[in-house]
Image: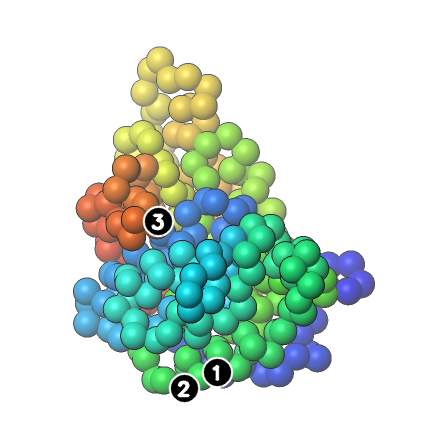
Amino acid sequence: MNGFSFDIASYPALPVARGLFVAGTDTEVGKTLVAGAIARSLRADGRTVEVFKPVATGCSRRREGLVSEDAEFLAACSDSRRPLSEITPLRFRTAVSPNIAAAREHRDVDLAVIFDAYCELVAAGSQAVIVEGVGGLLCPISDTFWVIHLAKMMALPLVIVARPGLGTINHTLLTLHAARSAGLKIAGVVINRYRLEPPSGPDATPPRMLGDDEYAMFTNPQQIATLGKVKVLTLVPDEPDNNVARGTIGDNTQFTLDQIDWWRLMK
């Protein structure tokens, strides 16, 4: 790939679907939790939902083969009966970027497996598709095909999941810049694991006696909204019941994400 080229002309066209592409500013920011909660929210509204995580690393080997914990969580949240191997068609055991995992495991990155699985999923006719990326937008799936290329091919509005604390302004603005450079539509930003009372308005005064980390957390949402010219959709609380491994979403987290009209954002 020549520099940061987001040209997808050499790849097959993917079917048009109504849905969202959940991306992160980094790994371990809570993409899976947010994607699952969105799927659960849509299901609670009576929508039929398909979930898709095109590639996963750090998978566990079981009798039926490599299994993605994230795919299990997404399937449970969406009430999907689709086999996990179709929800996450490309799986690696090594917990690194997919291209490096493939090289270490002496395997090819078969992009056609991803494309074919997505086409079959869309053809199933569900009302909404929730896609979760791997790592950040510039995470390489293969050496020449990154998450951002797939997001562009799917053409779904982007929900960006960000950290709450120090460093998130830089990470989020860089993600927004990359997304806009690729021509992606941005639905908004979700800030995950927020540990303070949320600001009550654009001119909210931070509580007294905050430490530097807490002060940064309190002011970051408005900074991201203003500097990034983007809607901060919500602040997701940090609560113990948010646990993908256990398959649980905290009541406050689900309630918070239920307040967003995800169906409208898919337009």
Q: Give the residue type that dot 1 points to.
A: Cys
Q: Which residue is mark 3?
A: 245
The residue most toward the top is 209
Q: Which residue is mark 2?
A: 123
Residue 220 sits above or below residue 15 on the image: above
Q: Sort mark 3 into few (<14), some (14-19) or many (20+) by Cα contacts within 10 Å.
A: few
| Sequence-first tag of 1 and 3 | 1
Q: Give the residue type that dot 2 points to.
A: Ala
| Res 242 seen here | yes
CA gap, disc 2 and disc 1: 6 Å
| Sequence-first tag of 3 and 2 | 2
Q: Nearer the viewer, mark 1 or mark 3?
A: 3
CA gap, disc 1 and disc 3: 28 Å
Q: Nearer the viewer, mark 3 or mark 2?
A: 3
Q: Is the residue under label 1 in contact with that under label 2 (CB below 8 Å)? A: yes
Q: Sort mark 2 into few (<14), some (14-19) or many (20+) by Cα contacts within 10 Å.
A: few
Q: Which residue is mark 1?
A: 119
Q: Which element type, helix, strand or loop, lies under badge 2?
A: helix
Residue 10 sits above or below residue 249 on the image: below
Q: Give the residue type that dot 3 points to.
A: Ala
**Coloring scheme of the render?**
rainbow
Using the image as rendered, state which of residue 111 and residue 30 is in the foreground: 111
